Image (spheres, helix red, strand yellow):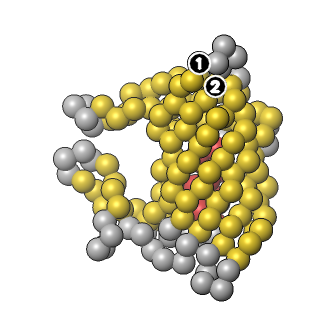
Amino acid sequence: MQVRLIAENSGGEKTYAVIFGKGDEVLSGLTEFAEREKLTAGHFTAIGALQGARFGWFDAGQKAYRDIPINQPVELIALIGDVGVVNGAPQIHAHGAVGFPDGKVRGGHLLQAFAWPTLEVFFTSCPATLVKVEDKETDLFLFELNA
């Protein structure tokens, strides 16, 4: 993974290019990046291609994500997400869609993905802190803007 700061404004907002190479795991890489830069709020978009991935959809009855496995090379049509703080550490939340050779699309909540040959992320960090707290009904960590 390569990272370069490409813009910074006087209000403290920064934009980074975060480029994943062959075989890099995306979610762990984004988490590592957010931890290293001490990000407490922000958002990102990405495009590229993957050699495989695992998306999910949230099953409220089970309070768990159900797997949507992607076991072949695909185009990453779009990946969008944000970062907030959970228990003092940055947490990445991302959703994406991938395209298959026949034009079919699958996607959902990103659980794991491996870039191949590249994934291009543009990540904007904000100087504020946005905190996520556990929602007892779902066991998910959700933004609480008054925290």
Instruction: Locate residue 6 relative to residue 127 in the image: left or right.
Output: right
Task: Give the answer, above or below, for where 145 lies relative to 56.
Answer: below
Query: Circle 1 is placed at which residue position?
Result: 104
> Is 28 above or below relative to 63?
below
Place residue 54 in its image quadrant.
top right
Is 76 above or below relative to 14? Answer: above
Residue farthest toward the top in the current orientation of the protein: 102
Q: Is residue 111 above or below residue 146?
A: above
Q: Earlier in the sequence, mark 1 or mark 2?
A: 2
Image quarter of the C terminus: bottom left
Q: Are marks 1 and 2 in contact (CB under 8 Å)?
A: yes
* Residue 94 placement (x, y as % from top left): 51, 46
Asked if residue 72 shows in the view, the reply is no
Q: Which residue is mark 2?
A: 99
| Residue 125 image offset from top left, x and y in percent | 59, 68
Q: How many marks?
A: 2
Q: Secondary structure at mark 2?
A: strand
Type of amino acid at the residue the image marks with label 1: Lys
Residue drawn at x 30%, y 31% is 59
In percent of the image, x 70 and y 77: which residue is there? 8
What residue do we see at 51% from left, 56% from top?
Answer: 82
User: Mark 1 and mark 2: span between their CA atoms?
Assistant: 6 Å
Where disc 1 sits, the SS reads loop
